[in-house]
């Protein structure tokens, strides 16, 4: 008999850029009737591993991370180790799939942060996150992303993208899984036995979060541009024998 699991597949903790402590995240998730959460901190699985050790008796914990690829952000679900930095989306996909994990495109169609249709078509991820409670223009983007997933015949997921423990479960994914085991949950997502549900987080919270994320991305781009410029100058020096 399949299990109908209610899981928030996009949660951040204090181990990356969130104010949400693990104990508060788990408490809120249980209070809201979630069966599980995916801990997807930016570029680290440390909190996910800790959550599995401490809280697996209370809630299902899917380990993972959110990776800032050159093309946009990607979620790796089922991953228990960090990835090398500086990878492209296809390289990330190969790393993740070798480890039996899934690649999910979060918050698509958001400038600087989410991938567009062409990148997603080239990547062919395992699923698209069509509901994300931290998105601006939540209803409009949710409908647009659902149409995108349907047109590409890709499964849909939902997650809060919580950077504050109080927002856990604002959006989530209902998963028709054969069991509560990790392998069966990941297989159900890949097979498309998912239904995203939920609501937007408070507007002020979303605006503040989006502004911070875009600023971080812009600053990172400036740093990378500066590094590239220094590399180009150094290459000219070498060619000129200086």
Image (cartoon, rainbow, N blue to C red):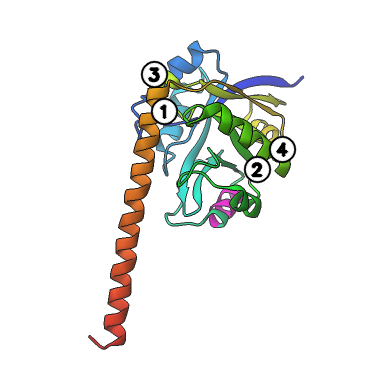
Task: Point out residue 82 in the picture as x, y percentages from the top left corner.
Answer: 45, 46
- Mark carried by residue 53: none
> Which numbered disc, 4 or 2, marks the residue closer to the eye?
4
- Identify the residue at image location x=33%, y=27%: 19
Query: Mark 2 sits on what residue?
Result: 126
Toward which corner of the image does residue 141 lie, by quadrant? top right
Dominant secondary structure (helix, strand or loop) of the stretch shown in magenta: helix
Query: Mark 4 sits on what residue?
Result: 150
Q: Residues within 10 Å of mark 1 (few under 14, many from 20)?
A: many
Q: Nearer the viewer, residue 155 or 102?
A: 155
In this rendering, position of residue 66 left or right of residue 221: right
Query: Mark 3 sits on what residue?
Result: 24
- Identify the residue at image location x=28%, y=76%: 234
The answer to whether residue 16 is visible is no
Q: Which of marks 1 and 2 precedes in the sequence?
A: 2
Secondary element under disc 4, as helix, strand or loop, is helix
Secondary element under disc 2, as helix, strand or loop, is loop
Task: Point out residue 173 in the picture as x, y percentages from the top left corner.
Answer: 61, 25
Query: Mark 1 sits on what residue?
Result: 206
Spatial CA span between label 3 and label 2: 30 Å
User: Magenta segment range?
Assistant: 91-98
Toward which corner of the image does residue 174 lie, by quadrant? top right
Quadrant position of the C terminus in the picture? bottom left
Query: Is residue 93 covered in magenta?
Result: yes
Task: Point out residue 164 in the picture as x, y percentages from the top left corner.
Answer: 38, 24
- Identify the residue at image location x=51%, y=44%: 114
């Amino acid at each position: 008999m399949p299990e109908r699991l209610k899981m928030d597949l996009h949660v951040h903790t204090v181990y990356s850029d969130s104010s949400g402590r693990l104990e508060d995240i788990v408490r809120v998730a249980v209070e809201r009737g979630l069966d599980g959460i995916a801990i997807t901190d930016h570029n680290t699985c440390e909190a996910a591993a800790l959550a599995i050790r401490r809280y697996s008796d209370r809630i299902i914990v899917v380990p993972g991370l959110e990776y800032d690829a050159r093309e946009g952000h990607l979620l790796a679900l089922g991953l228990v180790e960090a990835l090398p930095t500086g990878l492209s989306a296809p390289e990330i996909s190969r790393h993740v799939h070798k480890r039996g994990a899934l690649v999910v495109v979060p918050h698509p169609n958001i400038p600087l942060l989410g991938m567009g249709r062409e990148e997603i078509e080239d990547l062919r991820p395992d699923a698209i996150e069509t509901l994300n409670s931290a998105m601006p223009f939540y209803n409009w983007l949710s409908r647009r992303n659902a149409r995108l997933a349907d047109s590409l015949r890709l499964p849909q997921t939902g997650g809060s993208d919580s950077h504050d423990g109080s927002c856990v479960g604002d959006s989530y994914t209902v998963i028709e899984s054969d069991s509560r085991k990790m392998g069966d949950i990941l297989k159900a997502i890949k097979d498309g036995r998912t239904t995203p549900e939920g609501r937007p987080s408070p507007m002020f919270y979303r605006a503040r979060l989006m502004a911070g994320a875009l600023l971080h991305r812009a600053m990172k781009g400036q740093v990378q541009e500066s590094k590239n410029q220094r590399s180009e100058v150094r290459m000219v020096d070498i060619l000129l024998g200086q």
